[in-house]
Image (cartoon, rainbow, N blue to C red):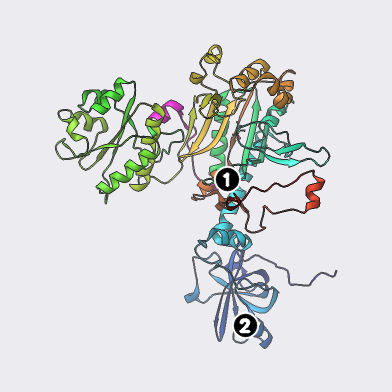
Amino acid sequence: MAEEAFSQRTTTCGGLTKADAGKKVVLNGWVHRDRNHGALHFINLRDRYGITQVVVDDDASKELQETAAKLRMEFCIAVTGVVRLRPDTMVNLDMATGEVEVKAESIEILSKCLPLPFMIDGEAEPNEDLRLKYRFLDLRTQGMQERIKLRHEFIKAIREYFYRTDFYEIETPTLIKSTPEGARDFLVPSRFYPGKFFALPQSPQLYKQILMVGGFDKYFQIARCYRDEDARGDRQLEFTQLDMEMSFVKRDDVLELMEEMFNEVFMKVQNVQLPAHFRRITYHDSMNTYGNDKPDLRFGLEIHDLNDLATKSSFDMFKTTVENKGFVKGLCAPKTEGTNFSRKVIDALQDTAKIYGAKGLAWAKVGADNKLSGGVSKFFVGMEEELINEFDAKEGDLILMIAQEDWKKCCTSMGAVRSKLGKDLDLIKEGYEFCWIIDFPLFEFNEDENHWEAAHHMFSMPQAQYLDTLESDPGSVKGDLYDLVLNGYECASGSIRIHDVELQKKIFRICNIDDATAQEKFGFLLDAFKFGPPPHGGIAPGIDRMVMIMAQQTSIKEVIAFPKNTAACSPMDDSPSFVEQDQLEELHLKAIFPEKKSDK
Ligand code: ASP
């Protein structure tokens, strides 16, 4: 087929400046805005690089005027013309090209555009499914253009760092063995082997460890991970990680390398100087002080341990909790401009605490002259000053307290109140607050299944001092694992790995996987560990989440070109979709449809 002739661009819509005045140019792009003032017709032409004003003057040929009159929003066109300076009164310094315009000599319509389902110029369309159905249009919006660019620059800077520091970029397979690793696997049926399946990787974890056994001591990859989880919150079925692993390292080597890498990347991409080292907080301290293991350090509102004060109070509920080896914790919400700690506000805070398991949320308002009023203040008569001093509280502040026998519930419910107050009182500073959370418990007890399971994954090394008590007291074992937290989001998890077959088997056993099952499911890893595995460790920061934070968004869909919607579908290509019967047969599969509720 003969190629369609069209005037190809000589420059982009973002590059023309005063220095180009007088030049003949060709621009290709989309009609962003079109204002026809009769004698003068202005067209804002847009491409990825910017917007240039094109003018069809009143002395333009009839043909040109007719073509210009046919233009509609988002038509794709080629403009040939001459660059000229805008009259002084028309200069727009908000636009990179705002000092010039292109006087059109000819316009070619390269393709037309149907009436738009939503506006591209302005605020994002609120109907998310509509945005995703017409993602190709949504991608043209300034916001999406900027975020996809940011994502590209972030990944590019990461690659540059790893190339420079001697890492190999190695791909691991996307068709792998299904292994019980936490989330549900996506399965891919094998056509050659009826009844057998590949799984899509939840992460390249085992393969990167085997690469270490293979001698590639510094590995990284921008890896796609797949987890068939229920559509909850801001999850996607597939997401992207920077996956990395190193041999012959200890924990601090991994942490320091990440600090150096993120320092370089944030400077390159956003011109932001991060601290050379990020704060390290133990899991235990983080829970105690911030009420979760992903603290938002952009604001204070630290949680205090009030057990001593509680025992001295006359509040029986507090006293009994402490006697029963429970916990009383509290924080002090500052009175900021415009705050009114009304009954309604306090009720809302109580509701939040209860969602996270608190029985109640006790409160007392700080008045003038070290006095407390309302709520549980009557139980602190005589020790008001002590409570106020504990928080260095000021008049108008609100002290909030939770008593709970279960430590974790006490921390998390107080943490939920802290997070709500951070937002509601507008306490969150701008900027980036990174921290490491270290010394996590290695195991968590799964109440539903009544056995221990790995808190992170089963390949993390227990800290040396717990090796003898692994089986007798799994609950107290701390692992050599770490999370990177940014602005209250968990952005990366990693660990020093086990590289000893017997220890690995022991961990499997504690997690209710017997030796035979371990061999069947993870035999390839255990076998590799019999052939001189090096000590190794790594980490995997989530790319989507980090770019989301950098782009000041609250959904990862805003930084993924083609995400699924909240119902885990893609409105654009209508996936998932039914397939032909033949295709199923070829794969030796039969679809079984769940009974409809009304059929029962
Ligand atoms: N594979 C782990 C994950 O996806 C990260 C790591 O331990 O490197 O959470």
**Residue that label 1 marks:** 544
How dense is the environment of label 2, judged by Cα within 10 Å: few (below 14), some, or many (20 and up)? few
**Residue that label 2 marks:** 69
Q: Which residue range is magenta in the image?
A: 268-288
Q: Earlier in the sequence, mark 2 or mark 1?
A: 2
User: In the rendered view, would you say 418 is above or below 206?
Assistant: below
Q: Which mark is residue 186?
A: none
> Marks 2 and 1, Cα distance to the nearest angstrom?
43 Å
* Residue 389 at x, y percent in the picture: 22, 31
Magenta stretch: includes residue 270: yes
63 sits left or right of 53 in the view: right
The quarter of the image that holds ligand 1 is top right
Residue in the picture at 22% in, 33% down = 388
* Residue 290 at x, y percent in the picture: 39, 34
Q: Is residue 114 visible in this depiction of the protein?
A: yes
Q: Disc 2 on helix, strand or loop?
A: helix
The amino acid on which the numbered mark 2 sits, given as a three-letter code, is Ala
Foreground of the two, 386 or 535: 386
**Mark 1 residue's CB less than 8 Å from ligand 1:** no
Residue in the picture at 63% in, 61% down = 136
The amino acid on which the numbered mark 1 sits, given as a three-letter code, is Asp
For the view shown, which residue lies furthest in the top direction? 468
Magenta stretch: includes residue 44: no
